[in-house]
Amino acid sequence: MTTLTTRDAVFALMREGQMKLCAAFEEIDGAAQFVSESWERPGGGGGAARVLTEGAVFERAGVNVSAVHGAQVPPSIWQERPTTKDQSYFATGISMVLHPRNPYTPAFHANFRYFEAGDDWWFGGGMDMTPCYGFSEDAIHFHSTLKNYCANHFIANYATYKETCDDYFYVKHRKEMRGIGGIFFDNLHPDGPEGFEQAFAFTQEGIDAILNAYLPVVRRRMHTPYGERERQWQLYRRGRYVEFNLVYDRGTVFGLQTGGFIEAILMSLPPLVRWEFNYQPEPGSSEAMLADFLRPRDWAELSA
Amino acid sequence: MTTLTTRDAVFALMREGQMKLCAAFEEIDGAAQFVSESWERPGGGGGAARVLTEGAVFERAGVNVSAVHGAQVPPSIWQERPTTKDQSYFATGISMVLHPRNPYTPAFHANFRYFEAGDDWWFGGGMDMTPCYGFSEDAIHFHSTLKNYCANHFIANYATYKETCDDYFYVKHRKEMRGIGGIFFDNLHPDGPEGFEQAFAFTQEGIDAILNAYLPVVRRRMHTPYGERERQWQLYRRGRYVEFNLVYDRGTVFGLQTGGFIEAILMSLPPLVRWEFNYQPEPGSSEAMLADFLRPRDWAELSA
């Protein structure tokens, strides 16, 4: 049996995470600040979207926290967990998407979420990275950091979470991966009286893991010189991001179904995107090598 | 009972339509030509995509013809027509999307399609226009042309088809219309021994109606001077086009499910698109007035 106190604790964690992350992203950007937009959901709940626009490092960064509740679990949830059908629910989460300006800096996405439906509760979340150009060094750093983070929590399993992430971020209609993956977990409800605290602690450390896993990669790439060719490739690759998010992304589908603040739900869409009919990168070029680079592999076991 | 001959006749109509329309679009563009890309579908059938890129008038124009068949009607069809479940099917169609360069020139979309499933057959199709700036004169011309076209065919009903179009091109999550609508019909299977010929003739004239309804609007707007403000608004509005097509468009969903040539299926996506968090046009501006302009009204009954 859960109480309002657990909801409050998780919501507070999400809000603190938002403040901490936004401060760190502003610091690395050095030029632009986040602006906040609070919203209420007519059906119950609301949230706060924080968005940084036209920064020096980030063309757009959005960090959104929401807490929504309702009398009926939405279809995207009960289709996965049939026992929750017709139950009331509460959901809170933090989600973020960062679209850097420099084409050599990968885009980044993370979310952590907590659900209650009837007497059931569970945590979910994870993070993944989407480069336009493949650097083994970055992928190794990212996955090693996530592996170490998971190793600190006996309830977590890096190998399984990585596989879940790889399965999820597959753009079926393109037959290609969205990025280099990362970790994703769902339905995390550890057994025993300490289960909630264990899952909470794992989520809490996940927010720090974002900074450790992603920001060193940003610092390494954000000043790399680039030209029109790299910019155009970045805009083109962002098309895949849009396709994935509008067609497959569970958070987006949940948002469109529950009808939250649409600007926060679609905050993940990149600032500028390009589609080109039947584009094929020049054979042998860095652009052409990306598809192979994105094939899932055990990055944490490789050395730079 | 339908025979292979009817399939051949409809497919030939689609191919002729593609040639005629591409020639007309090239003529008005004056700078760029269509390039062709043929494709085969592993499951059966194929098509030919014709795409004009970076023209003087059209930033992108795509006209695609396909004919696909399979042993099992895909879900997007049988969910609408349960009796066709587990039947084999044949589908041929022409679809086109034109994204003009000048922000004062509306984008345009049309398709005509023909299905056979078991012993059943039906036609569908229509066309609609998506301006970034509202001009009553254009909307009146467009809808009057479509009303006259329908009036030539007793099997057709402009009022119903307009309503179907208005219902369909509603971007639910934005609570706004995609454009000024037009006509759309589905499940057209007139009774009687002449039914097929009547529906065929209606489809055939529909291809000419495209030229009469849309091209005069293009000619009227294609040289209108514009600046960065109008360009940015156009790119922003194209975001709605992407959202509609990837989330709701039945042709796109059918394409993603049947797995045709993905570049032809996603040919509808604009060449360059912009998203901006929580953007609100300046109150009282032409941009701010668009949402109201797009509300469905009886354009064909108004006078310019």
Image: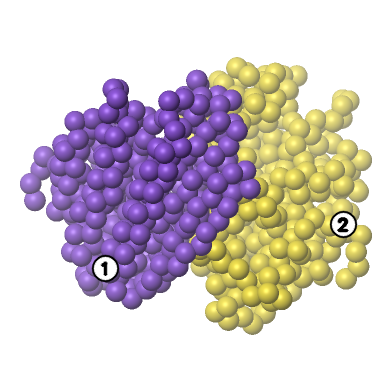
Chain colours: A purple, B yellow
Residue lying at 34% horizontally and 66% vertically, measured from the top left: A58
Amino acid type, callout 2: Asp
How would you rate the neighbour count of disc 2 (Cα within 10 Å): few for under 14, some for 14-19, many for 20 or more? few
Q: Is residue A61 above or below residue B47?
A: below
Foreground of the two, A238 or B90 = A238
Mark 1 or mark 2, whichever is nearer to me: 1
Q: CA distance from mark 1 to mark 2?
A: 54 Å
Q: Is residue A165 left or right of residue B119?
A: left
Chain on which label 2 sits:
B
Q: Is residue A296 above or below residue A272?
A: above
How would you rate the neighbour count of disc 1 (Cα within 10 Å): few for under 14, some for 14-19, many for 20 or more? some
The secondary element bearing badge 2 is classed as loop
Q: Does residue B145 appear in the picture of this structure? A: no
Q: Is residue B88 left or right of residue A266?
A: right
List the residue tagged with mark 2.
Answer: B298
Q: Does residue B299 appear in the picture of this structure? A: yes
Whole-percent x, y for residue A125 in the image: 35, 40
Chain on which label 1 sits:
A
Whole-percent x, y for residue A145 in the image: 17, 47
Residue lying at 52% horizontally and 43% vertically, measured from the top left: A68
Q: Is residue B124 above or below residue B88?
A: below
The quadrant where residue B242 appears: bottom right
List the residue tagged with mark 1.
Answer: A28
Residue lying at 90% horizontally and 64% vertically, measured from the top left: B302
